[in-house]
Amino acid sequence: NIEIYNKKNKYMAVFTVLAALVNIGGNYLLIPTYGYYAAAYTTLLAYFMLAILHYILSTHILKISFYRLKDFLSVISYNIIAASDSRK
């Protein structure tokens, strides 16, 4: 992991806690109404948020660019479309 190599472990911890809070908060609010679908979608949202935060960390803070932003967003968009289409 590039953050470990560059000794930026505190960012990883903060990002992981933020993603966990989004997941827990979303589950708490949405599971009573939407059931297990809400759990799946809030987990998906938390993982996408975590991926975006790691992308921002690697490109803006560490100044390392593995992917172009356009490619990164297209992969995320494809996954969102695939996840929303799988419910049918």
Image (cartoon, rainbow, N blue to C red):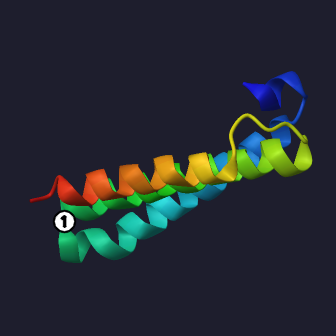
> Residue 6, image x and y in percent?
90, 28
Is 6 situated above or below 53? above
What residue is rendered at 85% in x and 36% in y?
Answer: 64
Residue 29 lies in what quarter of the image? bottom left
Closest to the observer, 42 or 27:
42
State left or right for residue 85 relative to residue 2: left
What residue is rendered at 58% in x and 46% in y?
Answer: 71
State left or right for residue 21 relative to residue 64: left
Residue 21 visible somewhere in the drawing = yes
Identity, as a three-letter code, of the amino acid under mark 1: Gly
What residue is rendered at 79% in x and 38% in y?
Answer: 65
> Residue 72, image x and y in percent?
59, 47
Is 7 situated above or below 15? above
Which quadrant does the N terminus fall into?
Answer: top right
Residue 50 visible somewhere in the drawing = no
Secondary element type, mark 1: loop
Q: Would you call the spot at circle 1 few (<14 residues within 10 Å), some (14-19), or many (20 or more)?
A: few
> Residue 81, image x and y in percent?
31, 58
- Identify the residue position indicated by label 1 in the image: 35
> Residue 76, image x and y in percent?
48, 52
Image mark count: 1
Residue sitting at the far left: 88
